[in-house]
Image (cartoon, rainbow, N blue to C red):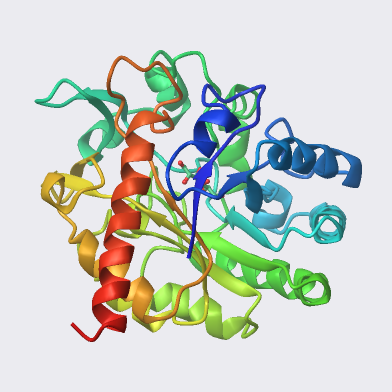
Amino acid sequence: MKMTLRWYGSKHDTVTLEQIRQIPGVTGVITMLYDKQPGDLWTREEIHALKEEVEASGLKIEGIESVNVSDAIKTGSKDRDKDIATYIECLRNLGEEGIRLVCYNFMPVFDWTRTELARKRADGSTVLAYTQEAVDALDPEKMFDSIAGDMNGTVMPGWEPERMAKVKELFELYKDIDNEKLFENLVYFLKAIMPVCNEYDIKMAIHPDDPAWSVFGLPRIIINKENILRLMNAVDDVHNGVTFCSGSYGTNLNNDLPDMIRSLKGRIHFAHVRNLYFHSPTNFEEAAHLSSDGTFDMYEIVKALYEIGFDGPIRPDHGRMIWGEVAMPGYGLYDRALGAAYINGLWEAIEKSQTRGL
Ligand code: DNO
């Protein structure tokens, strides 16, 4: 595996490439052109400039998170083929620049959903949290406003204000889309982009829906083992793969994470590793990465990745806000650096115990 950190670009991130470079064992970043809207073209020049900036710091771009998919593609509306053509052009430009991994999601309207961005924990740190009760009590149009005050002046991925200003229209677009239709549209999209992915060996890695169930009555499909395997089989090409996000699949306590990892052998191209602490099945918060701080057995998760021969980029995911840092919720430097060191430690221990036959 290659240890990475997500980086939003010098204009948006509070964390610098120089800081990332100093985290032991981190060799690359996962980044994107953050100002692009779904459906926009990413030019080769723009990608090249980003690459040069990252490489000048001694790091490498290990993948893109995300080239976002437009609502026309997700809903299968009339502009879908035009947007797919643009997406293919983006992939070609990324491929020409030697970038071989693209993470994306197929969630309608809202990307990952949290109801609190700064829940205080006993140690004084703050974390992102979710309760179903809060979602049920909320008008979806108010979702953005309810959390915007805690964004620390940053633009959070999937929660861009321009997009959130049109939530009502977005809901309208999805009113006739159920899970089956959404799945069909995803397969249509993947089949259309597989030729360019094959040409440049670009691995597409779908991010799970977070939380892994329907919110506000919207369809959600990438939520469990059965559905993700169905997608793998529907487009049976190694370039149609998965971002295995423990924190997203893990929102549903029925998902057996190590078992899912094993069943996706050969198709996991990217891993997000983080822990959650559950107060109840529908009330959870994002813990520190350590097993002892949350509900998941992180050793078993990393061991499953090791055992399937996972060799793609991995990254610590959302961290707690600690030591007075002011940053994008979930994406500060300190706790993610601790997470990277911890995952590296687990990996080294697992690797040595297996290769030395301990
Ligand atoms: C949140 C992220 C998601 C993820 C997208 C992938 O922190 O994990 O926004 O990047 O869903 O497209």
Number of labelled discs? 0
Residue 302, position in %: x, y? 31, 66
The reply, left or right, for residue 219 in relation to residue 82 is left
Residue 265 in which image quadrant: bottom left
Q: Residue at x 29, y 56 (%)?
A: 345
The one of 122 and 19 positioned closer to us in this rendering = 19
Quadrant of the drawing holding the C terminus: bottom left
Q: Is residue 78 visible?
A: no
Q: Is residue 226 visible?
A: yes
Q: Residue at x 19, y 57 (%)?
A: 296
Using the image, determine if residue 129 lies above or below residue 63: above
Q: Residue at x 30, y 14 (%)?
A: 324
Residue 4, position in %: x, y? 51, 49
The one of 158 and 244 positioned closer to us in this rendering = 244
Using the image, determine if residue 167 lies above or below residue 195: above
Using the image, determine if residue 345 lies above or below residue 162: below
Q: Residue at x 78, y 45 (%)?
A: 39
Residue 81 in which image quadrant: bottom right
Using the image, determine if residue 73 lies above or below residue 265: above
The reply, left or right, for residue 95 in relation to residue 301 is right
The reply, left or right, for residue 341 in relation to residue 241 is left
Residue 121, position in %: x, y? 15, 27
Q: Residue furthest front?
A: 356
